[in-house]
Every structure is written in C-alpha cells, then in structure tokens.
Image (spheres, grey):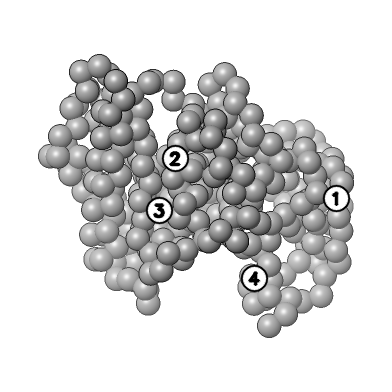
Amino acid sequence: MKAAAFDYLRATSVAEACALLREHGDEARLIAGGQSLTPMMAMRLTRAAQLIDINEISALKFIALDDGVARTGACTRQCVIERDAALAARVPMLRQALMWVGHIQTRNRGTVGGSLMHADPAAELPLVAQVLGATLMLRSVDGVRAVPAAEFFIAPLTTAARADECLEEIHWPLWNTHRTGSAFVETSRRHGDFAIVASAAQIALDDEGRCTRAAFGIGGGNSTPVAFAHIAKNLLGALLDEQTIAAAAHASANEMEFSSDLHAGADYRLHLAATLTARALRDARDQALSKS
C-alpha cells in the first residue's frame, strides 16, 4: 500500500517546527527517522495532511552528561546512543535495551525520541524511560514543558504530548552509586520483533551487598510499560537472595493485566513476566556485586 497524499514540509530549527505544528494542528505529524511512522502511513493506519521533517535539525542531535543527568536530543540516532561509551558507562540500560531494538538498519535510522513518541507498549525505550524515571522536555511556541515518563505514556501509541509540541530532549537520571548494576531482557518471536514481554531492572548495593536503591518494570503486558516503585521499595535493605527476588517478580507480574493474542496467551505472558523480571533483577544484582 501507499500513504495517503500529504504536504511535505522541512523545518530547519526547533522554533520553525513548533510554529508549523501550531499552524497546522492535529493534521500535522513530525518525522525524523521514520522507522515507525512511515510503515504506519503506508498501511494507512495513520494519516497526516502535513508531514514536518525535523531530521536535519542539528540542535536535536546530541548527548550530554551533566551533573546528575544524561541528556539526549530527541533526533539522536539510536545507533549513536548505543555506541557512545561515556553514556553507556553512566546509563548502561540504554545500550542494553537498544541491543533488542529492531536490527542494525533500524537503529541506524531510528531516533530515541521517535521511539518514545510512538509509545508502543512493547517497545524497549519507553520501558527504560519508565524504569529510570526519565523526563521528556516538550517544546511549543509557548515554551518548554517537562513531563515525567510516568505521566507521559497514556495508552498504546498515545502520549501526553500536545499536537503543537515537539519532543526536544530526554533527561535520564544518573545513579552515582558505584556498586550499581542494570539489566534488560525480553522474549520475542524473532530477534528484532517487538517484545512479547520485556523486563528491565537497576539495582544499587552497599558494601555489605544490601540493596540501597532499586527500580524495575515490565513492558509488553499492559497498555503502557509499568514500573513498580512500590514493590522496589520493599527491596531496600535486603540482600536480594533468590526468595526475595522471586517474591518481587511474582508480585509485579500479578499486578499486570495480560491479554491473549495470536502471539501468546495471557497465562504465558504472566509466566514470562515473572520469569524475566526475576532474571533482570538477578542479573542487575550480580553486576552490582561484581563491582568492588
């Protein structure tokens, strides 16, 4: 199939992109890498009267490590994020998750902001944003609005971004504890497919091996990825033995509302969620323990 007819507009700055969004409203869509939007338009699952290309806006392509936060521009290629050693050292979950995203060709074109704005509940980067508590900076002609990831993902393919807002950058909190480990695991029908279920975890330990900070979540089950901050609090002060990990994994999986489709049944997804969450917590713990 081919996309319905549209007007092609190219923005040369963030200000121009915002002005075009304000002018054309709900009829306009932004495009950068096009790895999600282009096939959806080709299958006519979505339409745009005006397609605004922001791919050449250099101000949206950057990686910066500041005090307490890593900032990435919305149009930064996924392959650039994946290969940046300094970013991987401070936010390792990003590289761990991107290894599961599509294929090399997908990541060469796809952008970090595009994946977050697309908001597929089974996609990897939205889950990372939820687990790490990222903040998304949305710009319009009226200024910048900061939206926490917990408030950004509303439903499948639906976010809190308004029609006249452009995602400008993403802030990823840094964990400054030396003994920190993270992990991202998923199961899909084929490598590169969207996850049937995915789980991500990050753990910080003290010198005695007790948990001082924890964050973990599950994607591919609910209408949005879910982080379980209330269950993670129960891990504080614990040594994270197998019993503690299994209890947290089962408690989180049982809070999900899984459904059946042609790829997997609800019971299988529940089993996967508990198994993968335990694996992610265990791998994150072991990575933290390996740091002296």
Seen in the picture, residue 44 relative to 179 is either above or below; the reply is below
Q: Are marks 1 and 3 in contact (CB under 8 Å)?
A: no
Q: Give the residue type at disc 2.
A: Met
The circle on residue 219 is: 3
Q: Give the residue type at disc 1.
A: Ala
- Left or right of residue 51: residue 273: left
Question: What residue sits right under mark 2 in the picture?
Answer: 93
Give the alpha-carbon distance from disc 4 to disc 3, as whole Å: 22 Å
Residue at screen point 19% across, 26% down: 238
Question: What residue sits right under mark 1 in the picture?
Answer: 11
Q: Nearer the viewer, residue 190 or 204?
A: 190
Mark closer to the chain start, 4 or 3: 4
Graded by Cα atoms within 10 Å as few (under 14), some (14 to 19) or many (20 or more), the crowding at tag 2 reads many
Q: Position of residue 197 (x, y in %)?
A: 36, 58
Give the alpha-carbon distance from disc 1 to disc 2, as whole Å: 32 Å
Give the alpha-carbon distance from disc 3 to disc 2, as whole Å: 14 Å
Mark closer to the chain start, 4 or 2: 4
Seen in the picture, residue 84 relative to 177 is either above or below; the reply is below
Element under disc 1: loop
Q: Position of residue 222 (x, y in %)?
A: 40, 57
Q: Give the residue type at disc 3.
A: Gly
Element under disc 3: strand
Give the alpha-carbon distance from disc 4 to disc 2, as whole Å: 28 Å
- Left or right of residue 18: residue 215: left
Question: What residue sits right under mark 4 in the picture?
Answer: 39
